Amino acid sequence: MMTAQPVHPGKTLSDEWLDQMNITVTDAAKALGVSRKTVSAILNGRQRISKQMSIRLGLALGVPSDTWALKQLEYDLATMNRRRIRVKRLTPANFAGEVQ
């Protein structure tokens, strides 16, 4: 079953916050205390929203900082789940009879 492509949190930041508030990348960078290049990379999905950036965004936008950290985590997990990862299921039966 195909699932929808996850949305990078930078797209959410761009579409639902900066664009709605008519804030430029340059102005956002100044307010956040980071480079324009950093903000641009996040908005274009080339860079993750770090824990520190989550705090900066939370303070600047007046939303809980964990909102941005969770959006990034959800994106990361959705992206990782699209790859094939092979593991063996851990159950007590798998290890019965082994010496500890």
Image: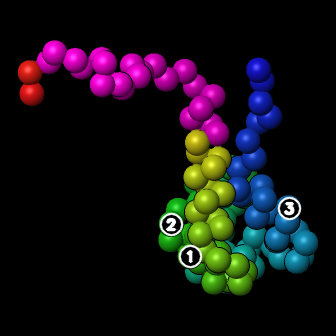
Quickly name the residue at label 3: 15
100 versus 96 height, above or below: below
Residue 28 shown in magenta: no
Residue drawn at 63 percent across, 84 percent down: 59
Q: CA distance from mark 1 to mark 3?
A: 19 Å
Mark linked to residue 51: 2
- Between 13 and 87, the residue placed more toward the observer is 87
- Give the structural element (helix, strand or loop) at label 1: helix
Q: Earlier in the sequence, mark 1 or mark 3?
A: 3
Q: Are marks 1 and 2 in contact (CB under 8 Å)?
A: yes
Mark 1: amino acid: Ile
Measured as percent of width and height from the top left, residue 69 is found at 58, 63
Check disc 1 and report the residue beneath it: 55
Q: Residue at x 71, y 84 (%)?
A: 62
Q: Is 56 on the left-hand or right-hand side of 45?
A: left
Q: CA distance from mark 2 to mark 3?
A: 21 Å
The quadrant the N terminus occupies is top right
Q: Quadrant of the C terminus?
A: top left
Q: Amino acid at mark 3?
A: Asp
- As displayed, is residue 49 above or below residue 84? below
Magenta stretch: includes residue 93: yes
Q: Residues within 10 Å of mark 2 (few under 14, many from 20)?
A: some
Within 10 Å of disc 3 (Cα), the crowding (few <14, some 14-19, many 20+) is few
Q: Which residues are magenta?
A: 78-98
Q: Quadrant of residue 3?
A: top right
The reply to whether discs 1 and 3 touch (Cβ–Cβ < 8 Å) is no
- Quarter where residue 49 is shown: bottom right
On screen, residue 98 above or below 57: above
**Res 27 seen here:** yes
Q: Amino acid at mark 2?
A: Lys
